[in-house]
Every structure is written in C-alpha cells, then in structure tokens.
Image (tube, rainbow, N blue to C red):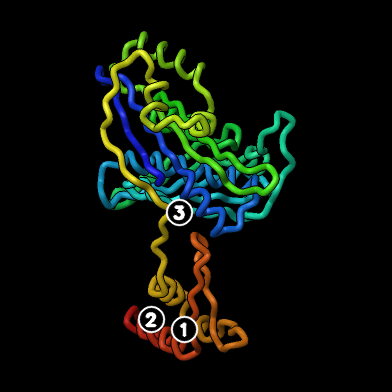
Amino acid sequence: MDRIIRTITSDGSLMASAIDSTELVYTAQQLHGLSKTACAALGRLLTGASLMGAMLKKDDAALTLKVNGGGPLGALVALSDSRGNVRGYVDNPQVELPIRQDGKIDVGGGVGHEGRLAVIRDLGEGDPYIGQTALVSGEIAEDITQYYAISEQVPTVCALGVLVDREKGGALLSGGLLIQVLPGAEEAAVKQLEANIAKLDSVTTMLAKGLSLEEMCQKALDGFAMEVLDEFQIHYVCNCSKERFAKGLLTLGPQEIRTLPLDSQGRVETVCQYCSRKYYFTKEELESLAEQAAGSLKKEK
C-alpha cells in the first residue's frame, strides 16, 4: 500500500518526507495508457505533487502542479489534496522517445526545457497562491528543487523516480524524497546533509533493495536524531461525476448545448481527463440542461 511519512530532526534543522507511490503510478498508467516515457514523466509529477500536497496544513487545501516545457508530451498536470491523494494527466500519453545513452528514460526530452513549472496552492481562503519558475531540465525533480529555491527561498532537495520495465513498459516501482533546510539551521547541519545526499542511492534503487520509507529518511538524515511527524496512506483518486460534467455543459449556453453532436445511440459522450471515466448525456438530458442554461441567462438580464 502506498504511503507517505514526514520526519524532522530532533534539533529542528531539517525535514524529510518520503513516499512510495508505486501503486498510484501504476494506476495512472493503466487509466491513461501511458508509454514508458509518459509514465516516467507523469509518475514523477504525481509523486512530487503528493509529497508537496501532504505538506499543506489545512484539511480542505489542494495543490496543483502544471508543467509545459514545449516537448512532445505536451502539458502535464497533477493535483493533490492535503493527504497526498493525487490525480493527473498528460496531453500526449503515448509519446515514446528512445532511451538515452546512459540507459535512462528521456523524461527531459519528452517534457521539454523551454517552459515553466507552475505551483498552485488553494487553501480555500479566497484566491489561490500561484508561483512559477522556469524549467531547469524538464526532469521534474530538479525543477521542483528550483521552484522552492527561487519562489519560496527554501533550500530543498527533491528526488523522484519511476522504474519502468524496459521490455513490457509497465511501471514497477515509484517513489520520492523531499528534504528541506528549516530556518535557523546551522552551517554544519547543511554540510552534513550535502554529504548524505551525495552518497544516497536513487529512490527506486532504495525501494528495490527493500528499504522502508523510514530507512530512506534516516539515510538522508544520517548523523541526526530523527522523529516521525506523521504518516498516511495515499491513493490515485478522482472526484469526477456526471453532475460535475453537467455543470460544465451548462457553461456552454443553450444554443451550444442543443447543437452538440450525438453518437450513434443519440448521446453525447464526455470523458474525464484525469481518470478516463465516461459519462453520457441523452438528448432529453441535454434539452433539460439547455433549458436550465436559458433560465440562468434570463436571470442575469
């Protein structure tokens, strides 16, 4: 079962969060039919969003990560709640790029390097906070690290990994680490952290070796006494419904609703971009929506 833990050093100088996102990335791959390249890219973004969302302090808060680097994958989006549950999509889920010369999946080539990472925090208290930074590499983890350094001035190390079967293309292991230097940390603590990070295996290597999330955090915080702040299970969760799609159709206006093309069974098909679930509206249901839309226009006048 996927989960997140959040830890802190006893001296209050460093925080480290670790995540095993294997099942949720596998779920995303099955829902969207992701290629190896798309799976590695969206899987990293979902994992990063889950880590960042779990840091929100309000139960009804939400976080969105948006990346568009101009690469062949197109835009990537991941949404998380404050418990780390996520959903997301990529514009072109079947794009596949050749493996790089170092044997790794070319996530940066798929995402591109010429765009921005946008981070949207909605705390349910009015307008959401939006921060944006230029992409560093399109590899996702480096871009999240850059975002924290520039937009929030928080020294951060982000490591994200998705291990994909080279032959069959299935997602095998996924996870991440997010480590931050807290205000008041002494220079010696920062140097110790840097030395620890230099020795760390990749996230997927640690997971493949059977390390627990606690052990991963302890390796990152070697030399410090560590306390676990909290932990919880995470899932790929979509909150779509036919009612939500109906509200979306109402924004089209009565004429547009009545002229929507019908399929061979006399229905309009709508598809959720986050989970690929389909909802159908009959001609009668569309007429009812058109009348509602017309009524709303009269009230506005």
Residue bearing the label numbered 2 = 297
Is any part of residue 146 visible from this angle?
Answer: no
Q: Nearer the viewer, mark 3 or mark 2?
A: 3
Q: Is residue 41 above or below residue 8?
A: below
Is any part of residue 94 visible from this angle?
Answer: yes
Query: What's the distance in space between the residues labelled 3 and 2, CA to CA?
Result: 34 Å
Q: Residue furthest front?
A: 210
Type of the residue with mark 2: Leu
Q: Nearer the viewer, mark 1 or mark 2?
A: 1
The residue drawn where x is 33% and y is 26% is 15
Query: How crowded is the residue under tag 3: few (<14 C-alpha within 10 Å), some, or many (20+)?
Result: many
Q: Residue 246 is drawn in which quadrant? A: bottom left
Type of the residue with mark 3: Arg
* Element type at mark 2: helix
Q: Position of residue 34 (x, y in %)?
A: 61, 53
Q: Is residue 57 above or below residue 243?
A: above
Disc number for residue 254: 1
Query: What's the distance in space between the residues labelled 1 and 2, CA to CA?
Result: 9 Å
Pointer 3 or 2: first along the chain: 3
**Marks 1,2: beta carbons within 8 A:** yes
Q: Position of residue 289 (x, y in %)?
A: 42, 84
The residue drawn where x is 46% and y is 46% is 65
Residue bearing the label numbered 3 = 87
Q: Position of residue 227 (x, y in %)?
A: 26, 25
Q: Nearer the viewer, mark 3 or mark 1?
A: 3
Pointer 3 or 1: first along the chain: 3
* Element type at mark 1: helix
Q: Residue furthest bottom?
A: 284
**Marks 3,1: beta carbons within 8 A:** no
Between 267 and 20, the one nearer to me in the picture: 20
Query: What's the distance in space between the residues labelled 3 and 1, CA to CA?
Result: 31 Å
Query: How crowded is the residue under tag 2: few (<14 C-alpha within 10 Å), some, or many (20+)?
Result: few
